[in-house]
Amino acid sequence: MAEYLLGIDNGCTVSKAALFDLEGHEVQVASRIIDLDYPHPGWTERSMEGVWQTTSQAIREVVERANIAPQYIVGIGTTGHGNGVYLLDRAGKPLRAAVVSMDTRAADIVQEWYASGRHAQAFPSTLQSFWAAQPNALLAWFKRHEPDTYAHIGSVLLIKDYVKYCLTGTLSSDFTDMGGSSLLDQVKGNYSKELLEVYGIPEVLGALPPLSRSFDVIGKVTPEAAQATGLAAGTPVVGGLIDVVASALGAGVHQAGQACIVCGSWSINEIVTTEPRTAPHIFMTIPYAVPGLWMIIEASAASASNLEWFVKHFCAEERAEAQRRGISVYEVCNERVDSLPPGGTNIIFHPFLFGSNVQATARAGFYGVAGWHTKAHLLRALYEGVVYGHLSHIERLQGIGAHMEVARLTGGGSRSRVWTQIFADTLRLPMEVADGSELGARGAAMSAGIAVGVYRDHADAAGRAVRVVRRQEPDPQATPHYLARYAEYQRLLEAMREPWEHLNQLQ
C-alpha cells in the first residue's frame, strides 16, 4: 500500500493541509480561512482556539477526500508564518488571543531599542534586524502594557509550534523559526538570559520551548488530536520550519549558492550560504533546514501584490477578454507585457503600494507617463518595477558576500513566463521553476520524510520530491535595457525621498 506525508502550513490568514506521496506530488489539499481581529489600530490578532479548529478541519478534509487509511500517513511536518506570538498559561491553555506577524503595537519599543543602542548590543547574537511583530518586542510590550498577561505566561510559542502542541501535547520549537525571533543566541545556538535582559524580559527564559532540528521527531499524534483530525494516533510529528525556509526546501533548494525568490504578496529573497553573512541593515540571517547551512533573507511587501491591485482597479477590459477566452486575466496581462520588447517602455514604476525597502514613507507611482503610452506600457513598467525591487534586495545580500549561481522562482509571479524572463535578464541568473503549488507544505512534509527514513537526507528529498518544470536563461541582449532602466529607477528613488516625506506629512 502506498505511503504518504502530510504538510501543514499556517499563514497569517489561512490554515492549510496538504497530502503528498513519497515522490512529492500533491494528492489532496484543503484550507480554511482564519478570521483576524483588529481590537485597536495597529493590532492584529486571532483566536488560538480558532487556529486549531481550522487546522484540524483542513486535516480531516484532506484525509477524507484522499480516501486512504490514516495509518498510511507515515510522518507529519508543520510550517507557518514567522514571528508573532502564541502564549500558553501555566496549565497549557491559550492565555490570550494570538498576535500575528502583521501586528505593529510594539513599534515604539523597537524604535526605543534602536535609539538606545539595544539593537547594537543584541545584534552579535541575533544576527538580524528588529521589527515590531517579533516575540522579543511583543513580550516587552506585554510586560509594559498587559502585566497580568505577562505574569501568567507559561509557554512562548510560534504558530507552527502551537499546532504541534495541539497535535502531540509536546512543547517544542526549531532553530529556523526561533532563529528569526531575536530570542535565540544564534552564535551559541541556545537561549540566553543575557540576551533576554537586553530586552528587559529575563523572566520568560523558562517559558521558551525546547529546541530541535526541523527533521527531528518531537512527538506523536495524541488520541485526542486523532479524534479531531482523522489522523492515526501515534503518527510521528517533526520539529518543522519557518515558512520562508519551508518554501525554499519545497522548491528543492538544499545547497549553498542556491537562491529562492518569492514573487508573491511579499518580495522574499533568500540565499543559502555555508556560514552566516550578517550586517545590521540585512533583514534576517537564520539557520537553514540543512545542518551546517545558513539562509540570509531580504524582504519587503513590494512584489506581485502590485499587479493584483492594478488588475482589480484598471483591468476590466482584460477581465472581460479573459472570460471570453476561458483563461486567467493574468495570462492576458502577460500577453500585453510580452507585446513590447525589453526596453519597450520608458515608464518607471515604484512597487510600493503596500510597503517598501527604501523608507517607511515611500509610495508607489508611475513616472514618465505620456499621452501615447498604452496599458501595455504601464503593465510592462509594473512587471519591471517589481523585478527592480527584488534586485535591490539581492544587491544587498551580494554586498555582504552572498554568492548565488541559480535561483528558484516561486509565488504567483513564477507562473508567468514573461515575468520569469525579466527576472533572469535583470538578475543575470538562470531562473528555475519547480513543480507544485504548495511548496511550504511540501517542505514541511519533506522534513517529516527525512525524520522517518523515507529520504536519506535533504539532497535525496529534493531529488525525489521536486522537479524543475521550467528553466529560463538570461538573454544577454536584453540585460542592458533592464539595467539602464534600473539605474533610472534608483536615481528616481533618491529624488523622491523628500517628496515622500512631505506627502506623508500632508496625509
Image (cartoon, grey):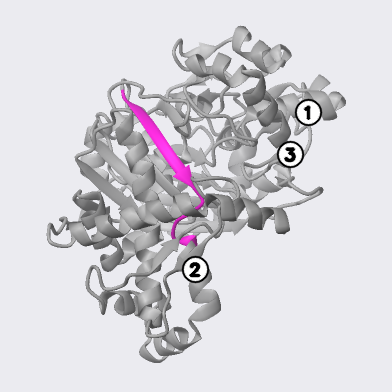
Residue 302: say if magenta.
yes
Percent x, y of residue 181: 56, 28
Numbered disc 1: secondary structure? helix
Q: Is residue 279 left or right of residue 398?
A: right
- Magenta stretch: give its range: 293-305
Real-space Cα distance between discs 1 and 2?
A: 36 Å
The image position of residue 433, as x and y in percent, is 26, 55
Q: Earlier in the sequence, mark 3 or mark 1?
A: 3
| Three-letter code, disc 1 | Phe
Residue 442's place in the image compared with 257, above or below, is below
Q: Residue furthest top?
A: 194
Is residue 438 something one can see in this rendering?
no
Extreme residue in the left direction? 476
Residue 327, quarter of picture = bottom left
Q: Residues within 10 Å of mark 3 (few under 14, many from 20)?
A: some
- Spatial separation of the CA atoms under disc 3 and disc 1: 10 Å
Confirm or deny contact between disc 2 and disc 3 (CB under 8 A).
no
Q: Secondary structure at mark 3?
A: loop
Give the residue displayed 37% in from the left and 65% down from the top: 383
- Quadrant that contains the C terminus: bottom right
Crowd tier of the residue under label 1, counting other residues whose Cα lies within 10 Å: few below 14, some 14–19, many 20 or above? some
Report the mark closest to the observer, 3 or 1.
3
Would you name the residue on which mark 3 appears? Answer: 105
Residue beneath label 2, please?
308
Which residue is denoted by mark 1 in the rendering? 142
Counting residues from the start of the chain, the first of labels 1 and 2 encountered is 1
Amino acid on which the number 3 mark rests in the picture: Arg
Secondary structure beneath label 2: helix
